[in-house]
Amino acid sequence: MSAHATSGAAVGGGHGATALPEPGPRTATGVPTGRLGIWWFLASEIVIFGGLIVTYILFHMRHPEWGQEAQHTITAAGALNTFVLLTSSLTMVLAHAAIGRGKRHHADLYLSATRILGGVFLIVKAFEYGREITEGYTPVSGLFWSFYFAMTGLHALHVLGGIVAMSIIGAWVRVGKNVHRVEYVGMYWHFVDIVWIFLFPLLYLTS
């Protein structure tokens, strides 16, 4: 039986499926190359966001007045987006669990819910940007705002990328193809959520 056939048998409705099938080549340690690839990708993302966060903290230590600048951010919107992303992390976990049980329809629904929540996050963020820019706070309004727009903008692009990836993988799930990649996009999405958990207090609640 081919790897693809095995994948289809495990997720096409069989109730005994408890783990995601992972067809394709593996490394010498037995780790699927796809999983290893996402690990390396996330490691590079940690370097990027980690570097920005550490740099921001170091500058903030030298500029305590940034606490006053942070008061002009929309804390309620940031808190709402934190709730939205945490909820989307839950729906992603449920999608992964559904695939593990062979329930593709449920997995597709949870992926759709995660995409919708990601879209809500971007809409709220766009509202924030519009309000802040209207009030005169732009990327060139000062060093704090440069960091603010750079870090939240980069994060928003990653949210958008996750939505696109989930749209593609959701289409695969509906036909029982490459369902193991739900795990990969889940790892990415949880990383995006964790980054926001750091950004929210640093940018909105700083003092």
Image (tube, rainbow, N blue to C red):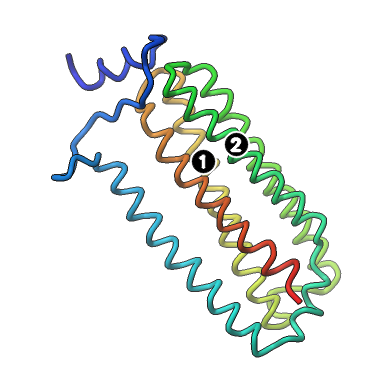
Establish if 206 lies above or below 170: below
Residue at far top of view: 14
Residue at 44%, 18% (x, y): give it: 101
Name which quarter of the figure residue 62 lies in.
Answer: bottom right
Counting residues from the start of the chain, the first of labels 1 and 2 encountered is 2
| Amino acid bearing label 1 | Val
Q: Secondary structure at mark 1?
A: helix
Q: Secondary structure at mark 2?
A: helix
Establish if 34 lies above or below 53: above
Residue 177 appears left or right of 171: left
Residue at 58%, 41% (x, y): give it: 89
**CA–CA distance in space, label 1 to label 2:** 19 Å
Residue 30 appears left or right of 100: left
Residue 23: percent from left, percent from top: 25, 29
Residue 97: percent from left, percent from top: 48, 27
| Amino acid bearing label 2 | Leu
Residue 43: percent from left, percent from top: 38, 59
Name which quarter of the figure residue 157 lies in.
Answer: bottom right
Residue bearing mark 1: 164
Residue at 24%, 43% (x, y): give it: 33
Residue at far bottom of view: 62
Q: Nearer the viewer, residue 67 or 111?
A: 67
Residue bearing mark 2: 90
Residue 166: percent from left, percent from top: 50, 36
